[in-house]
């Protein structure tokens, strides 16, 4: 059976900035969704959802049908409603996979799942990023060039305010010397969470073949054990306060 | 220099239930504080704070002077103000140690730090609890009998809805057959968090010499590196939403 | 493609002890192999190998064709040749999965992979063992009853002299009160190692439906990423001293 | 009471190569020992031992009096006797701290403790190394500049063939783009092991103030809980095959 993937995009830079729109005419979410569809074919059924839709496109129904959710946000984290965040949170703890992309390190959903600041150092110098594989046998690293070279990227640097990841798959270096834990796996409740840092709106990162490979691998990794539609545990009650 | 410890107590069972009041005439927090003072002497300066005080006794000033906070709650988790929780959260990420005791597994502060359900299975049958040491060289296990025997306790059982602990120090078994990860260490931001499950209001657990030893060891372990008053990192901004 | 499984058995108790031979007429390895074949069908191709065969049945050729190796030993750990151990070690680091069963906690191959004493406490009282699931969403726990009840077993107790496992799947309690980390995952090199403690020669544990389910799940989990025959990294040179 | 530190040096490059001798007239071990003595003062009692001494200077008596051992080797790993390695191994599992330095990643003692290949990528280009702090609150990072800048060093690169460290303290980047997990903590038995990669014989790294600070911090961190002379557990039997 196919894995149901929902690609969530904040879709603000694309609407406000001509240059981003030219880079991603269908939105960053559009390109991420296209990449997954092209790379995974019949193994996935991909749809998109954006901040601007009612309930940000993440209704109970949509989430109930989603096995893996990908999340990109940057300019409007605070505009995401707490109710939708709580809904996504509950669903992750119940088994839905979650891919957290780039500046979504500071999204509500990632911060609430981590329980920490999720802060990092950064500068935007268009530096070269080298993504090095730390665990060569990890399924998310399969077929990914080592290093994966991204010619221009925003620079992220340590310390990254997260709990120690359950598995550290990638570490990046940057032209300016920084290092960053760029590929981190977390198990939270029944769900699997993967944070992947490459992917700024100002660079065409989501067209990059190696980046696409990582995202495709991560979708397969994060899909719930037991296949799509695994029953949720009644014991997994969400944080409602 | 002495470690400044604040022992926080919900103090609801003690006020409402005659039997608990007889067991703990100064409150559970009173007995925990007395035990730490007796066992650690000049190494600590201990004070208490309770839910009923203004700001639950956890003002900015009190927290700024606290190196390690202990937290016991059960009947009134929801009555703890979100503002105070956010304040404690920020302070833990900035370096303050936190000991989370028994039913405080379901406190707001623990849930927000873990990002998971923090649910568990339980029954109250007055079963015997055996607390087994998993890491004999861990500082929190030093001098603790193996097993530590508690004649009567509420039973907690797995699965315990937490992230995998960074260090697993104790695992308990119960007369009814259950097992529970009863001593778990977490590093969150600059702070160290220790969860310890023995300690129900219906049993005189905080008089138990072995339990007192665990709490004393845990205070020493959780105290901030660099001693009391370690400067907080500016980068550790709290979750404010 | 099918996963190639080699079930290795020490096969000493079966040869020496009438009672064990009656319990396992085809050897413990015979029953483990049969269980995997029955439970996994065409997903596996299962063969057996024993201590008594030339090179203990683990020639270069056999190992090159093995995706997952299971290991049971007890009475004759020292009779396993260092050369074969080094060969298995190299192959695990290169990607072959390894299931280490019961008293094989003290096998040469497990000790060399762990680098620690691998000691534990034990007594043989035919006590009831309850195997509790700690990580309900782990693939090895899928479909396993919680708790898995084994009516009679040898008792294993903590502390278990292993490095902290990368994933803790099961913890057992015993009639006599002990607890034991009975299901532990380790990633070593490109290989996945699963230790599972139930399975003494004096009890019919490998006929138990729940135990069989764990072993079947573990074979699927431990199979090399990329499927059977994943190429070994040249960088993975073995310890040859 | 003072921590007893034994600084072990292979002492081969110093004897064979004029340039290394000029850089380290008292040997690399001499400089490491001097740095620890100067930086930690009365908190330590430091001695040295070398490959060329009888039993490599690591007699039963010396080890029994050692709380923390530091190990540097490169050219002569195979000349270290298996008997001495087994002795050090047993002592680490019993509680002695161990600091493994630079090319000692490939020493017998580190490989036997890790159980993996301990391989890495490397080139000697005198590149700049930046050692970044990943866990700012870790005692080994206290007072260490971030990044710690080493103007010239041999380059080490991932993948590093170790088990996932229990705590990852430092990650380095190099002028040539590589990253490396340069500061890794492991708990093995009752002992604490810290691997730190800076420190090639061709560069004056052990005079570097920041590197000295790391080593001093690591000695304090690795010292046995309970202070010097902590009794060994009888259960910690060594691997003797």
Image (cartoon, coloured by chain):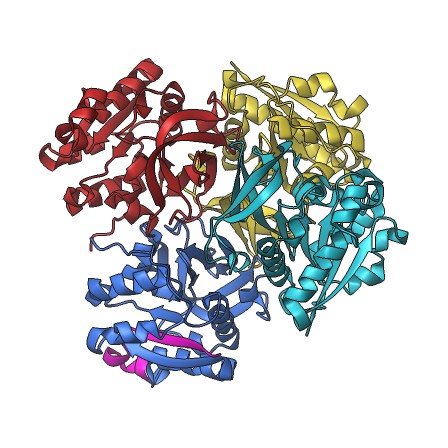
Chain colours: A blue, B red, C cyan, D yellow
Determine whether, in the image, residue C12 is placed left or right of residue B141. Answer: right
Determine whether, in the image, residue B204 is placed left or right of residue D154. Answer: left
C225 shown above or below D169: below
Residue D174: quarter of image = bottom right
C72 shown above or below D11: below
Q: Where residue A186 sits: x, y (%)?
A: 44, 56
Q: Where residue A117 sits: x, y (%)?
A: 31, 50
A20 drawn magenta? yes
Q: Which residues are magenta?
A: A1-21
Determine whether, in the image, residue D37 is placed left or right of residue D90. Answer: left
Determine whether, in the image, residue B199 is placed left or right of residue C218. Answer: left
Residue A233: quarter of image = bottom left
Please name whichever residue, D23 or C68, is drawn nearer the observer in this view of the structure. C68
Q: Residue at x 82, y 61 (%)?
A: C62
Q: Residue at x 64, y 65 (%)?
A: C39
A10 drawn magenta? yes
C64 shown above or below D68: below
Q: Does residue A170 appear anywhere in the picture?
A: yes
Q: Where residue D39 sits: x, y (%)?
A: 51, 24
Q: Does residue D53 appear anywhere in the picture?
A: no
């Amino acid at each position: 059976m196919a894995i149901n993937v929902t690609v969530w995009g904040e879709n603000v830079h694309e609407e406000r900035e001509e240059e981003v729109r030219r880079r991603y005419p269908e939105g960053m979410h559009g390109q991420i969704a296209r990449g997954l569809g092209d790379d995974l074919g019949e193994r996935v059924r991909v749809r998109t959802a954006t901040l601007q839709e009612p309930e940000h496109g993440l209704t109970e129904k949509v989430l109930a049908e989603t096995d893996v959710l990908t999340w990109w946000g940057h300019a409007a984290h605070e505009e995401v409603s707490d109710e939708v965040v709580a809904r996504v949170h509950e669903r992750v703890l119940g088994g839905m996979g979650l891919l957290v992309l780039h500046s979504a390190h500071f999204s509500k959903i990632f911060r609430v799942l981590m329980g920490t600041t999720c802060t990092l150092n950064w500068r935007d110098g268009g530096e070269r990023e080298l993504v090095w594989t730390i665990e060569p046998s990890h399924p998310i690293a399969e077929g990914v060039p080592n290093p994966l070279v991204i010619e221009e990227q925003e620079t992220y640097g340590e310390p990254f305010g997260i709990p120690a990841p359950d598995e550290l798959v990638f570490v990046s270096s940057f032209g300016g010397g920084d290092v960053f834990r760029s590929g981190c796996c977390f198990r939270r409740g029944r769900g699997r969470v993967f944070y992947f840092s490459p992917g700024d709106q100002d660079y065409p990162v989501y067209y990059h073949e190696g980046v696409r490979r990582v995202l495709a691998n991560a979708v397969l990794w994060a899909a719930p054990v037991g296949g799509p539609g695994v029953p949720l545990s009644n014991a997994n009650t969400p944080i409602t306060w």
